[in-house]
Image (spheres, rainbow, N blue to C red):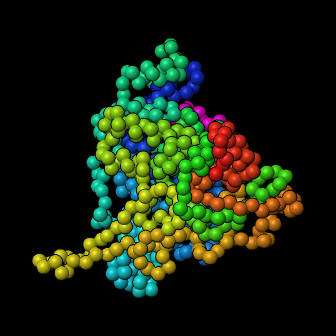
Amino acid sequence: MSSSMKLSLKLLVDKEKNRVVFAESDKDFVDILFSFLTLPIGTIVRLLGKKSSLGAMDHLYESVENLDARYFQTAPCKTMLLRPKNVSAAQCEGLALRVDDSEPLVYYRCPKKGFTCGFSSVPGVRCPCGQVMEVPFLANNLDSTEGSDGVFVRGATSYIVSDDLSVKPVSTGASLALFQKLGIEDGSVLEKRNVELGAQEVLSLLNRSLVSERPLTDVFLQEPVMIDDADKSLKSMMAVIIQTRVKYRSTATDSKRINVKLFLSKESDKVVYAEAREDLVDQLFSFLTFPLGSILKLLDKHSSLCCIGNLYESVELLSNNFNYMKSKECYDMLLAPKLPPYFGCNNQMLDIGEMCSQTIKVGHQSWDGKKTKYSYEMNPKLQTSGIETGGGFAKGMMTFMVTDEMDVTPLSPISAIHVINKLMVPINSLEEAHASLGEAEVLNLLRACLISRTVLSDVFSPSLLTLLHERWCGQNPSKSLP
């Protein structure tokens, strides 16, 4: 795909209000929009220059950038977080315009023994022979699903894409429903406009789809009003966070827990920072590897990611009501995308799947089958080469400091004083508290990281816990909060 390629798009515009009513398109534009659901958070942050407006995710990404390689299990762990793989990358190669600039089919092998040592999806993995896997090759013979005849939706259908990125097949009924929803009664205010869609416009659509309810208008008609969309979303979603906490705390029976030490300001009722081991840091860093579709699934579509939820529901609609998705596999790629091989963690609290590792046939089979040989994908997180799954990103037996804004550093008293002074918190107002995290709390951390820049305070502050307690007791008068 050429970076200079352009797609033509027809818009129906309300001239009086200078807004897009809907776009009319073929499958190419819809496939591009749906591909947003396959993108990992770390990729989105990188593509948007760490200005994604995704709550604290930009800070989390910068923490990985700034953390020295010796604080990771292996050096390739840092690459896995900063440039996470997209398991649908091979299919996305078929998009008319692709927002992700990664090279999806490039793998790495040993410079000395070739495929004998295996191969890796990231450079720098240690070979069994002691060398480092750094020789790139195109893995076009990996076992993967071919997507050469299309991407996600079926071919010859035209679609209506509303300003908030809800997608439906073209029909008079769908058009009239939008007119009614927008209060359009006079057709003379409507006009057709033709626009061109290039790589930059796709990137802008990705950006605005995360924070705006009208990304088509923002990108094609006017400069977006630069309001603080993240803070706006936070205010509207805090009640949902609290409700989710109640729901999960009342029903979850977690077998695994993560213990965290919190330092709070008694004056501001805020969490200043947390002391945590590698198990919490692995949870936080792993958020960068999660595709948007998986996040929507984990949070039951209540993610506050503005129009991304509409794309998710459009896939459901096109599959269940109209059967316009190409296959069940495409449906799963968008609504429940898995992590790439070896990107999962041993102590992962959240229910997110992981793809099986790849295998390459490197020998030629003779009539008796004895010459067939295979090369196996290695786990980049293991300090000694191997194909075992699991492992973590952060170095074990370490204590880290995690600030309210998701700056993660090795624990240091000097750094702690710097954070305290930066927030102008009197030292004598600090108090220590302990928290135990299970699946429910990690889900709330994920949600808060997407919409807030004060993550720990929003999840653990005493005032929120008090409100949660009152809400719980009001709904369950005979019970106390677990």
The structure residue drawn at horizontal position 77% and vertical position 68%, both measured from the top left corner, is 415
Q: Which residues are magenta?
A: 216-225
Q: Is residue 318 left or right of residue 399?
A: left
Taking the view exactly as shown, the residue that stands out farthest to the bottom is 129
On screen, residue 246 versus residue 162, left or right, reads right
Residue 285 can be seen, yes or no? no
Residue drawn at (78%, 66%), measured in percent from left and top? 416
Check residue 220 for magenta coloring.
yes
The outermost residue toward the left is: 367
Asked whether 422 falls inside the magenta stretch, the response is: no
Answer with the quarter of the image where residue 376 lies.
bottom left
Residue 34 against residue 456 in the figure, above or below: above
Return the residue nearer the eye: 215 or 201.
Answer: 215
Identify the residue at horizontal 41%, vertical 24% (top origin): 174
Instruction: Answer with the quarter of the image where residue 131 lies.
Output: bottom left
The x and y percentages for residue 41 are 53, 54
Measured as percent of width and height from the top left, residue 406 is found at: 67, 58
Residue 373 is situated, as x and y percent measured from the top left of the image, at 25, 78
Q: Is residue 367 visible?
A: yes
Give the total of numbered labels: 0
> Could you tell me which residue is drawn at 75 percent across and 61 percent down?
433
Look at the picture and state if 197 lies above or below 144: above
Horizontal arrangement in the rendering, residue 461 relative to residue 372 (left or right): right
User: Splitting the image into 4 quarters, where does residue 407 fall?
Assistant: bottom right
Instruction: State the image coordinates of residue 138 (x, y, percent, origin top left).
Output: 35, 67
Name the foreground residue: 105 vs 181.
181
